[in-house]
Structures are given as C-alpha cells and as structure tokens.
Amino acid sequence: MVDVSRSLARCPAISKGYRIGKAILLTMVKKDISARAEELRQRINYHNYRYHVLSSPVISDYEFDLLVRELQALESEHPEILSPDSPTQRVGGQPAERFERVPHPAPILSLGNAYDADEVRAWFDRISKLDDRVLEIDFSVEPKLDGLTVVLHYEKGVFILGATRGDGEYGEDITANLKTVRSLPLRIPIAEEKVEAPRRLVVRGEAIILRKDFEEMNRRLEQAGERTYVNPRNAASGALRQLDPKLTAQRPISLLCYAIVEGEDSQPDQQLEVLEYLKRMGFPVPEEIYHCEDLERAISIGEEMARRRDDLPYEADGVVIKINDLELAADLGFVGKDPRGAVAYKFPAQVVTTILRDIGVNVGRTGVITPYAILEPVEVGGVTVSQATLHNFDFVEEKDIRIGDRVLLKRAGEVIPYVIGPVAEARKGDEQPFLLPNSCPSCGEPLERLPGEVAVYCVNATCPAQLVRNLEHYASRSAMDIEGLGIRIAKQMVEAGLVSDVADLYQLIEDDLLTLEGFAEKKADNLLDAIESTRERSLARLINALGIRGVGVTVAVDLARHFRNMNAFQAATQQELEGIEGIGPNIAATIVDWNAQLSNRELLKKLQLAGVWPVEGGGHEGEAGLFSGMTFVLTGKLSTLTRGEAKTLIEQHGGKVTGSVSRHTSYVVAGESAGSKLDRALALGVPILNESGLRSLIEK
Ligand code: IVH
C-alpha cells in the first residue's frame, strides 16, 4: 500500500517545501489532488505511448511503476476523482455474460484479393475505365495484417467503445478487453503535440500479437504445462473474445491502425495523410508504409515485402495497395462488399497439403510428451518440410488427425511449421486413428496426465530422453552457460552412459569425452573447462538450471534474491514461497514437491559435493544479489557518483558493468551529456535510469 503523504509530497504545491501537519495538508490540497491525478494520467499515457507505440521509452519501468502507484494511491483515497479512462482502469472491467451487439457507424468492408501481379494490373485496368482521374493517381502500400479487425470509437478524445468487425454492419462490444491493450490510446491526442481532440473519431485497425511476444507467450505456457497457441492470429482473436478482461490482459496483444471510419470534415483526404494523422493522435500505425507514384512500383514493393515477410515483426498475408486520394476512392464505389479503391495483393501461400506418414512423439525436459508429424516432404514458403508440430494430443484428437491423412500444413515466419488439420474429403478409408501411447517412447515407463493439464507426462526422473533435455537446459545460456554442450553432445553423453544426471558432468574426465565421436583432446579440454567454470555461477542461474516446471529466469531471480543460498531454497515451505512477490500457489507447490523428491535431493547432494553450491556474498560472479544476471552500461556524468563508484555499487549488488549497449543490456545509467550510448538505448528500448533511479532501485 502506498502512503498518500508520499503522493502529496510529489504534488507541485507541496514539493515547494511547505512543512505543515498532515491534516492541514490534506484539506489544503484537496483541489490540487485532482490536478495532480490528471497530470499523472497524462504522464502515464505519454510514457505508455513511448513504450508501447514508439518502442522508445524515456523513463525506466521502475519510474513508470512509481507514477502508476502514485495515481492508484490517489484514486483509492479519493474515489470521487476516478475516471473510467484512467490508465489504472485498463483491467478494471467486470466479466461479461455475453458481448452486446453494436452497430458500426459505416459498413466495415473487406477487400478484393489479387493473387499475382497481373491480377493487380487487372484491378487497375478495371477502375481506370470507370474514372479518368485514376490515370493520374498515386498509391499507399501497407502490410495486410493478419489479426482481428477492430473498430475504435472516441468521443471528445476519450476511448468509449471498441467493437469487432462482426458481419460488417454490427460487431460485438469488446471495449473492456480492448482497454487492456497497452498500445491502444485511452485518450487522444497523446503525444505532446498541440493538437485538439476531435469531437468524434472512429478508427479501424487490427489487433495482433507480435511474433516475438507470441513466441515468448508460448514458451511460458509450455513451461507451465499449459496449452500453447497455434498461431498469433488465433491467440489474439481468442484473447479478445474472452468474457473476462483479466484473461485478455494476460495476453500480449498489440494494435496497429490504418483507417478512419468516421471523423470530422477537416480530416485528411489522402490515405498517407490519414496514417500521419493517426500517428499524431497517438495511434500505433505500421512502420512499413510506402508511397508509390505508379502501380508497377507498388507491385514491386509488394513483392519485396513478400520476400522479407518472415522478418516483419508481425504476421502479414499480403500488402494492401490503396488509392491515396480518398475522395476518388469513395467515388469509385464497391463491387459487392469490396471497395474498388483498394486491393489486397496476397503473398504466395504458405499453406500446402501433404501426406501425414506417421506421428512421432517427443519427450521434453520436464517429461512432457508431445506429438509431431512425420510428413511426405513438401516445399512451403521456399523451404522443404518433412516434420511439423502437432501441438498436443488433444489437438490430434479434436481435429481427428489420422495417419495417412492428407493434411494442411502451414509455415509462418520462424514459427515451426504446424499442421492445421486433415483434408477429410481426401480420405480413402485406410487412414489410421492415432492411439495415445501409454508408455514413454524413451524409457518405457507408464505415462501420466496431471489433473487440470492438457499435457501428458513421463514422470520417470531417470528417463534418458528427459535427461538429454535436462542436460541441454542445464548447459543453456540463461542457465549454467556451458559453451559447447548442446543437445547433440548431451545425447552422445547419455547414450554412452557417461552421465545419469547433471551432477555427473562434474565427474567427467578427458578420457570419458575422448570415447565420444568427434572429440579430440582440445575439444574435450575446452568442454571440461567450460563445465569447471560453472562452479562460479550465481544462485539464480543454478535454480533456473534445475529445470523445475514453471521456474524460468524471472522466477529463479526472485527465488535467489529471497533465499540467498541453496540450503534455504531446499528448505522452502509452501507458505514462505507464496509470500514471495511473483510466486503463486501453483509454482510454490511445484517447488515444494520438487525439493521433496528423493531423486532431486540426491541430485542436490551430488551438486553440493561437486562444489556447485552458490551462496550469496561468496564473491562469485553475479551471486544472488539484487542485480544478479543483469548488465548495466554507464554513460555521461552522474550527479554525485564517479563512474568507478557507480560500477562498484552495481557490482556489489551482483550486477555487471559493460561498455556497450545491446538488446541484452538490463539498464543504461545515464548522466549529464550522455551521448551515443543513450541514443542506442533509446533505439533498442533498453530502460534508462539516472543516478537517483539507480539508487531507488537499490533501496527498493
Ligand atoms: S483497408 C475499406 N488496410 O484485411 C478499407 N485492411 O481482407 C478496407 N486488413 O478484414 C480495409 N491490414 O481489416 C486495410 N493495412 C490494411 C489492412 C487491412 C489488414 C484487413 C481488413 C480486412 C481484411 C480484408
């Protein structure tokens, strides 16, 4: 709970240095409270916009959090100042029983498709016959985003309604869910611009999940034994259709806008100006927008974007070529539900069909068994694919996927190719339903399905397939970071019987490794050195390396910060674990169970005997300090500390100070006359602190 006097101390009227009793202070500043709350809302909206729309934050997450907390404190002390468009209300909505149907102010139309350049040219020929002006036009070319269309209503600059496309005439009211989308402005204009809020504005955009967020989200779900999503579109659309906005808020949805459905007369009459206008108002718009003077140029931009579609930050299934002159576009009218003024030039299909020869099963690190498709090799999106994921056994059952089926296969970006479903019409009758294995394909032990989980597990702690995955995880970059130990070598070691758990790595000698194919002295020595160096790793890394279900880097850092040594971690109780911020009852129970298992106790004993037993303050790299695992970059002249002093301070708390800024940098600490490092941090979205920010982080 935040003390309101702290909030008051930040109030401009008070920060000037009055020293008055708290009671007088409270009455005195009542009218200022609402002004301060308003100022905070504006600042929060602005920093939210810098972070989520511009990807260029100017304050650290911590400083942002302070602003939010202060506003929350003010609003809870003075409920009368609360407003529904306050940034604290993004996740305030109550679960709904169903979505209300709402009319769109104008039809939300779709687009005609062109599947190759000639079809684009044919579209242009058709419209040039209708109107001479077409011969002199220019175009905007935009990515055709593969998400869920949304229609956003603003009254006097306040977001009041958000709807799905529905049938184009009526949509569903998903306002509460859309409010949880961080890049959606709750109020416009948001930036510092001196632009007046339009009286009424209805904007069209696409709710999507960025590729990087999608991958991260699925990784987390998998770690927690939950069902993963097939693709970003399904995940975004599923999340926005949740009746409880709290569930939507858990999904990393983004927004990109591209059209005005209804606005004021003074609004731009060219598509490229519309995009500029939306941007100025604070709406996120796609970055890949082109202005083309002639059609051939627009076609080649489309083809060029098709070639780099996998590098786009989101999934797109084509480009939309639009006549820039919106008045002309409107005059051209429609064919059915498709406006003539724009065309979707689709990228070549990334969906193909092929035969499912067999279904294989994989054993993951935590014992999760997952099915995968063994396919008749087929080319999709320029790559030959012979294996694809089938997600989980429920998916195979729900889609009724049978061995021998012709299946639809999709490859999108770097996401592993996946089977969409069978082509039931192509069945001959000899296709075989898949039977869920009841024993582990690697160790033969019976499989189990844990209550409430979709995943099927092999719970044998000595299962060789799990051991391989465990070794791979133990050695991975964010865990013990053993260079040269990847899945291939882990497999060789297990097959040769050199290791039966991760602690056996510390008993290996050169002769053991020389028995493995591809190992000569130098390679063996390098690997032994790399293993040796892990005795110095931090507590957080070791906890992460143990591979406890649900315990990834973030949780491991929290645990290490709390327990400070392995003995305390091993003795953790459910209650103590639940008391740690960020750790819920499920993870707490998993940790207690893990620690209680005899095989795990024996493993820890072996690690301890091998000297892999990090203790906070033992002088090892990183240790379990506040900044363990974090890297800092110092730039500019700090207000009181010298660079050397700041470095020592960070290192004392387990952090590392490096010279150059990368995406992996945790914080840049910037002082006066900070130069290119600050620019780079801004460009990469690395959080920035000043000296007092650094100090408050430590005090916190
Ligand atoms: S313009 C009259 N621009 O693609 C305006 N649509 O097949 C028509 N879409 O559901 C829409 N990205 O919502 C436009 N940059 C973009 C788009 C886009 C995605 C969606 C659109 C519609 C579908 C049409």
Image: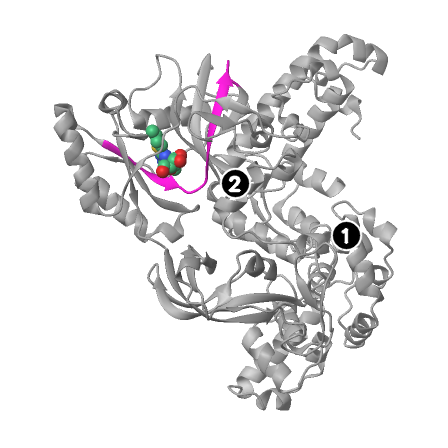
Snapshot quadrant of residue 35: top right
Q: How is the image coloured?
A: one colour
- Of the two numbered discs 1 and 2 on the same chain, state the one appearing first in sequence: 2
Q: Secondary structure at mark 2?
A: helix
x 67%, y 28%: residue: 92
Residue 575 placement (x, y as % from top left): 87, 50
**Residue at the disc numbered 2:** 237
| Residue type, numbered disc 1 | Asn
Residue 271 placement (x, y as % from top left): 31, 27
Residue 55 placement (x, y as % from top left): 49, 38
| Residue type, numbered disc 2 | Ser
From this view, report whether residue 418 is shown above or below residue 404: above
x 41%, y 33%: residue: 285
Q: Secondary structure at mark 1?
A: helix
x 82%, y 74%: residue: 602
Left or right placement of residue 566 versus residue 488 in this view: right
Per the picture, the main secondary structure of the magenta-coloured stretch is strand
Q: Assess disc 2: are there few (<14), some (14-19) or many (≥20) residues with their C-alpha within 10 Å of its C-alpha.
A: some
Q: Quadrant of ligand 1?
A: top left
**Residue at the disc numbered 1:** 586
Q: Is residue 135 visible?
A: no
Label annotation for residue 46: none
Q: Is residue 74 visible?
A: yes
Q: Where, quadrant-wise, is the N terminus in this rendering?
A: top right
Q: Which region is colored magenta?
A: 139-158
Left or right placement of residue 173 versus residue 244 in this view: left
Q: Assess disc 1: are there few (<14), some (14-19) or many (≥20) residues with their C-alpha within 10 Å of its C-alpha.
A: few
Snapshot quadrant of residue 246: top right
